[in-house]
Every structure is written in structure tokens, then in C-alpha cells.
Image (cartoon, rainbow, N blue to C red):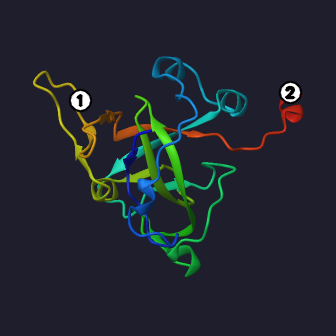
Amino acid sequence: GETPTNLGGDTGASGKGQGEWILEKYQGKGPAPDKESAKDRQINAVESAYNGYRKITFAADSGAFDHVVSEQELPGYDYEDSIMSAKGEGYIGAGGDVIENLGQVKAEGQFDNGNAAWIQVQRAKVHRNLASVSKIVKGGNRVVFDEDKNGNNASHILDKRSGKTTPIRLNGVYEFDMWFKDKAKYNFNLLAK
């Protein structure tokens, strides 16, 4: 196996040092759904459970302190207290409102192009999942927001250790998708009614 891209985000609450957990080898259980098949359909509970993966879209945010996902993301994952959540601390939103930190989880995933990655995310009541550009850079990556000579988006994340790149698309904001093993527990009898 190969070492996955480290997107950073370890706040130290896990007992491991900054980035230590990235040294664990990637144990992929098969590729994420390919980009073309995933692009044309909505991922819902039945498809997500069937495919075995769940897609999360992150906005690449240079102003975000941490990687943050909404409280609905990564159901079935074991969130633990972070340093902030244990102290009852949180974030200040763009409108000045206080957003409580609800804990953290380290998760193994894949980008659309199949590149493996680990990310530690904080859970909070947010409307958009944010990827902290500073945490991505601290994880050993270069983040590039750019256009080619024809004006086409050429933004990407470069893993400086492996040389692998992961595209970042421009969709009003810069964003990318990650696929995570779906650990949600669904009651398919209820879904079928």
C-alpha cells in the first residue's frame, strides 16, 4: 500500500502528534465510484449504502481554521471530543455568530481521481463543509488556485511527497469531493415503504 495524502487537521486531541496518524498505511477496500457515474446521479441513502461510499463536497477555504463538516456528515463514524468541544469552545461564523464545535473524527477517504487521503474533520452546525487550506498545506501539500493560458481552471492540490495532484474545481467557489466508506446504519424496510 501507499501512504495517502495528508490533508492535516490533527488538533492533538487524539493523543497522537501532528500528522502522526498519516504514517499508517492506506488499506483501501476498493475504488470510490468513478467520476462519470457519480456526476450524473444524486447520492441518497440507498445508493450510498449500495455503493459502499458517501460523497462529501468541501469548499477550499483559505480563511477556515479547521476542516469542518456539518453534523449530518459521516453518519456511523465515531466522533470523539476535540480540545475545543471538550472546553465548550467553537468558531465565529462570517456573520459573527458562535458555532459550537461538536467533536472530531479522522477518516480515510479518496478523491474523485482515486488518490487516497486522510483528513481530520471537526463537526459543527454549518451549511457548507470547509477544507482549511492552511491545514492542507501543513499536511505537506501545495494548494494552487490558477488558470491555464486559455483561461480554464487549473487549480489543484499537490502532494509534495508523492507528486500526485488532485483537481480543485471552480463552481462559484473552489471545491473538491472526497468519498468515504459509508458506515451509516439504514433501516431498508422503512426506505422501501
Q: Quadrant of the C terminus?
A: top right
Residue lying at 62% horizontally and 61% vertically, measured from the top left:
79
Residue 10, percent across and down? 43, 64
Tell me which corner region of the image, top left, top right, bottom left or bottom right, holds residue 111: top left
User: For numbered disc 2, what is the local secondary structure?
Assistant: helix
Residue extending furthest bottom? Answer: 87
Q: Nearer the viewer, residue 158 or 26?
A: 26
Residue lying at 14% horizontally and 27% vertically, measured from the top left:
148
Residue extending furthest front? Answer: 1
Label 1 Cα crowd, 10 Å radius (few <14 / some 14-19 / many 20+): some
Marks 2/1 in contact by CB < 8 Å: the verdict is no
Residue 51, percent across and down? 64, 27
In the image, 163: left or right of 14? left
- Checking the image for residue 134, the label placed there is none
Tell me which corner region of the image, top left, top right, bottom left or bottom right, holds residue 153: top left
Residue 44, percent across and down? 67, 31
In the image, 96: left or right of 164? right
Q: Nearer the viewer, residue 127 or 50?
A: 50
Type of amino acid under label 2: Ala
* Residue labelled with disc 2: 192
Type of amino acid under label 1: Asn
User: For numbered disc 1, what is the local secondary structure?
Assistant: loop
Compared with residue 181, is residue 20 higher up or lower down, i.e. above or below? Answer: below
* Residue labelled with disc 1: 153
In the image, 2: left or right of 167? right
Ranked by sequence position, the earlier of labels 2 and 1 is 1
Compared with residue 191, is residue 118 higher up or lower down, i.e. above or below? Answer: below
Residue 108, percent across and down? 51, 46
Residue extending furthest left? Answer: 149
Label 2 Cα crowd, 10 Å radius (few <14 / some 14-19 / many 20+): few
